[in-house]
Amino acid sequence: MLNLIKDDNPLAFNLKLSQHEQLVKRFRKIDYKKMAILNYSLLNYLLILYKQEDLGKINNIIELMYNSKQSVEFILGYTKGYPETSKNFRYLRKTFY
């Protein structure tokens, strides 16, 4: 997955990821500005285990979601797949904008 993100080759939004913590540590700041980073599992991990240092990462993902052609598909899919966490997402969306 790491190479796909770095090359900006998007995977399916609903691809289940494992080892989130290791992935998050290995992604570069620039990776969070690429469409390939959009993944329900990754966003859910960041929202559940929110840390202050992850705020910029979450913000970049939110900006991508609202500035892409696939944004409606991603947002609807995320809120259906992760209804409890998507409440946190809605709160963060209001906080950023």
Image: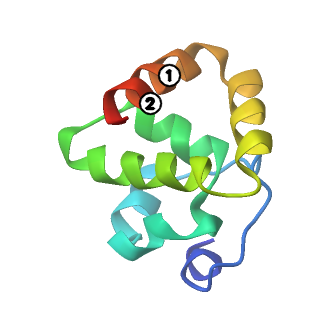
Q: Residue at x 76, y 31 (%)?
A: 76
Which one is in front, 34 or 19?
A: 34
Which amino acid does the dot numbered 1 rest on?
A: Arg
Among the 4 quarters of the image, the one containing residue 35:
bottom right
Q: Residue at x 59, y 74 (%)?
A: 5
* SS class, disc 2: helix
Identify the residue position indicated by label 2 in the image.
93
On the picture, is 13 further left or further right than 67?
right
- As drawn, the residue found furthest toward the left would be 52
On the picture, is 97 further left or further right than 23?
left
Which one is in front, 70 or 6?
A: 70
Which one is in front, 94 or 10?
A: 94
On the image, the x and y values in percent for residue 70 come to 76, 53
Residue 16's tag is none
Residues at marks 1 and 2, CA–CA distance in whole angstroms: 5 Å
Q: Which quarter of the rendering shows the C terminus?
A: top left
State if disc 2 and disc 1 touch (CB < 8 Å).
yes
- As drawn, the residue found furthest toward the bottom would be 7
On the image, the x and y values in percent for residue 26 come to 38, 70
Which amino acid does the dot numbered 2 rest on?
A: Arg
Q: Residue at x 76, y 64 (%)?
A: 11
Identify the residue position indicated by label 1 in the image.
90
